Amino acid sequence: MEDIENTGVARENAGSSRVPLWGPAPGSGPPEQPGPPASAFEYQPSADAPTEFTSAPAAPVNVRKPMEGKAVVAAVVVSFVVVAAVVVVSYVRGDGQPSTETNAAGTPFPVTTTEFAPVTATTTPPARPTTTRPSTSASSSASTPVGYRGVTGPNGIFVSIPQNWTVASGSQVTNHQADDPATPGAVVRYGASASEARPLYDAVAANESGVRTGYQRIKLATVSSSAEVVEWEFLYAVEGVQRHAFARYWRRAGLDYIVYGASNATDWPQTQQVVRTVVASAGPVA
């Protein structure tokens, strides 16, 4: 009784066999094997899923890794930078300028061209740059009629021409040409060049062979006995239009001077008046 009380064993357990401290009682069978360890990750059903499962849970969805998304964004940024660089370079080089050679349909644009317009009875000669030179001779200034102005030309020749006529270099470096702006084809030429060895009349007559179209001589003669002065008047044709011309030549101090006037035959009466005035004012005299 004392043993039971001292050991603290309940009365109802007093009759059972005691288990030794060093192991199970003989004949009590092998010890139970511990079960497998619990999985660290267990499927947890969602709140609206069935409370009991009869099959394995579905495999988790393969979500794109964040690095793949970053790679796509980087590729887009690089492409945009390349395209922008190409556009900037093209603009700087001038490639961005619109083409003037073709239109949207690929048809070439017409090219503007400039064609020479010959002087005829119905066409206006091309405008010539005005070159006005003041007279350097007192005799020229004194003989300048009203409505005219004095001008000088190559090798010291001076003449008077109408105020509104334009002056420019002639077809030869030894002459200048004045054009009537109101009468197409009406011109006056004046100049001087070194004298030839042959007589002035022979030098002038040699020019007849150069007038090939519609040539008709009206006059070719020496008109002064005291000096070499020759006058030549004739008709010729340009593109089917008859023209009238008059020239006066004189030789002085190793130079041959000339005043020449021409116009369409229908305009000659008014042009002739101008030519006579220019000849009368020309100098230096023979």
Image: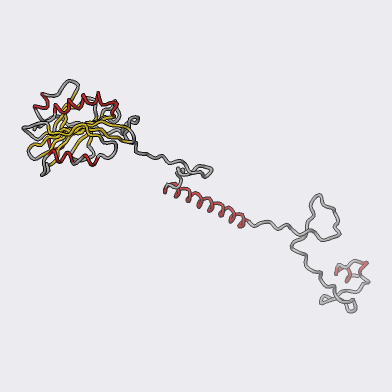
Between 217 and 60, the one nearer to me in the picture: 217
For the point 46% across and 45% down, the residue is 96
Between 5 and 187, the one nearer to me in the picture: 187
For the point 78% across and 58% down, the residue is 58
The answer to whether residue 160 is above or below residue 239 is above
Between 180 and 102, the one nearer to me in the picture: 180
From the viewer's perspective, tell me whether residue 73 is left or right of residue 32.
Answer: left
From the viewer's perspective, tell me whether residue 154 is left or right of residue 52.
Answer: left
For the point 43% across and 41% down, the residue is 111
Q: Is residue 162 visible?
A: no
Residue 277 falls in image quadrant: top left
The answer to whether residue 84 is above or below residue 218 is below
Q: Position of residue 69 (x, y in %)?
A: 61, 54
Q: Position of residue 188 (x, y in %)?
A: 22, 31
Q: Position of residue 151 (x, y in %)?
A: 16, 30
Q: Residue furthest bottom?
A: 26
Q: Residue furthest top?
A: 146
The answer to whether residue 201 is above or below residue 87 is above
Q: Is residue 159 visible?
A: yes
- Screen quadrant of the N terminus: bottom right
For the point 12% across and 43% down, the residue is 196
Residue 138 falls in image quadrant: top left
Q: Position of residue 72 (x, y in %)?
A: 59, 54
